Amino acid sequence: MTYAITQTCCNDATCVAVCPVNCIHPTPDEPDFGRTEMLYVDPGSCIDCGACADACPVDAIFPVDALTDGQKEYAAVNAAFYEDRAPRPAPEDGPVFHAWGAPSFPRTLPSDFAPIRVAVVGTGPAGMYAAEDLLLHTNAEVTLVDRLPVAGGLVRYGVAPDHPATKRIGDTFARFHTHPRVRMYLGVDVGTDITAEELAAHHDAVVYAVGAAGDRRLGIPGEERTGSVSATAFVAWYNAHPEVAPDAIDLSDVERVVVVGAGNVALDVARILVADPEVLAGTDIADHALAALRASAVREVVLLARRGPEDASCTAPELLALGRLPGVRLVVDDHDPRVWEAVEAAGPRDKAALLRGAVRERVDWSRPPGPERRIVFRFRSAPEEVLDGAVRVTGGAGAEPVEVRAGMVLRAVGYRGLPVAGLPYDESTGTVPHRGGRVEGRPGTYVVGWIKRGPSGGIGANRVCAAETVGALLADAVDGALPAPTGTARAFDRLARGRARHVVDARGLAAIERAERTRGEESGRPRVKLGTVPELVAAARGRRRAAR
């Protein structure tokens, strides 16, 4: 029986590396890699060995005959990917290779090369893939630096709490936190506690993996009104980010929420807003968010998309899952005849086809929502103005704008990278200018992840991104192009601890992990996150701090 990859695929290609018959595509050296929504197992080539399932860091791969009712569609999803991709003949008695060719993960650094010391700024997926690459393929010493007193980045603060399988990739990264060639400095802000120049002076190379912490704006009147919130802040709020206050979101008198956007983040926040709080109580959602959702008046979430369903920016797996939420009705607003025409005309591999099971309804936006919980897609609409208690949106098909009554507006139109102190910055793209990961005009300085390529691609896309950057770094090392550090590792330790108020190392991070899991055990949850810097620091030092 063949295997199939399901919704939680992280696209990092760990499964590709272990497959003995090259039946998982796209591979990292193929043009489609990073452009498809997930990876796919070819049922015609799979030999049912299970190596991919064993290697998968997010438990996304299962035998087809073991798929649950909610996953069975993924057998067809995997098979459909290969319908128009005929295999090419393989060598006699060899495995079947599709037209793209075999996978390749090249690394080059002479085995007798002197150890280099590399600082990685940021402990999210991009930074940790870069660190993993360096630790597994070279004898480099790695200094992990993060401005927060806890590691994880996007995995800890960006993945929705009801996606626990996706969070498991954090366990893969955590094994490198205690690697003998790793030194960890959490709670150290490059640009505030130490400068970029000081960091570079103590290392052969510095890799910045600081992500995209900002959010894109709508650029419409009323965007700054009370009740208009970025999805970036909302996601951080329900994930217990210490820089977002527990009382930042009030849902007690909000019946309808308008979410501007139709990407995966928009779907995440919509799902969390209407999910059963008792189901979320079994996750690591922030305590304050769980309490707010239990007291929430929200019954309807409207997903506002400028384009039609055929161009929805969410992935098919996330859209598929949205239609299976228990007790939640999925609706498509029938305000524009082109919307349902696109749904009906969609082919079996088109995302729009997944909306055929939704309710088709002409919604009266002047009325409050009914008693049932609903998620409503309104395609071919754009916000024109945020009003007091409503949003004015385009009507569609030449109609006049309409006012959608709503107690809250969440803009989920994308993240944006912020300037990095001491580095060049491209205002138009929100990224650091670079060539193949090399920061322009800064020898020995590199970027990886969203600050390098912009806020695109999921967790796994950072693996190939990191491979390119690390490859450039290693090539520069071999060519003698890295500036020689003037400070030692011990000198950097003194500098960081002397400048930063609270430095958390690997031992302190392990103490935080134990404290959160202990709190979780006490309440029947996987963990209860510590949501403030003082709480995190106190836990790192082995002290239990009373909740605020």
Image (tube, rainbow, N blue to C red):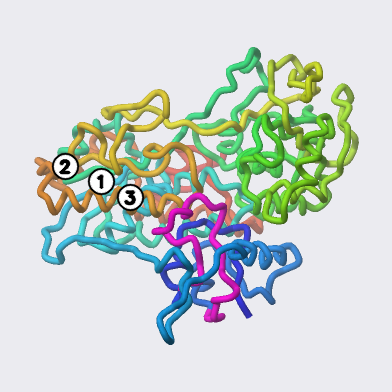
Residue 202 marker: 2
What SS does tag 2 mark? loop
Q: Is residue 38 magenta?
A: yes
Name the amino acid type tagged 2. Answer: His
The residues bearing labels 1 and 3 have C-alpha atoms spaced at a distance of 14 Å
Q: Residue at x 66, y 37 (%)?
A: 262
Which residues are drawn in magenta? 22-49
The residues bearing labels 2 and 1 have C-alpha atoms spaced at a distance of 9 Å
Q: Against 400, is 131 above or below? A: below
Residue 220 in the image: x percent, y percent? Answer: 62, 16
Horizontal side, residue 212 vs residue 257: left or right? left
Which residue matches tag 1? 119
What SS does tag 1 mark? strand
Q: Is residue 510 magenta?
A: no
Q: Residue at x 41, y 68 (%)?
A: 17
Could you tell me what secondary structure mostly forms the magenta stretch?
Answer: loop
What SS does tag 3 mark? loop
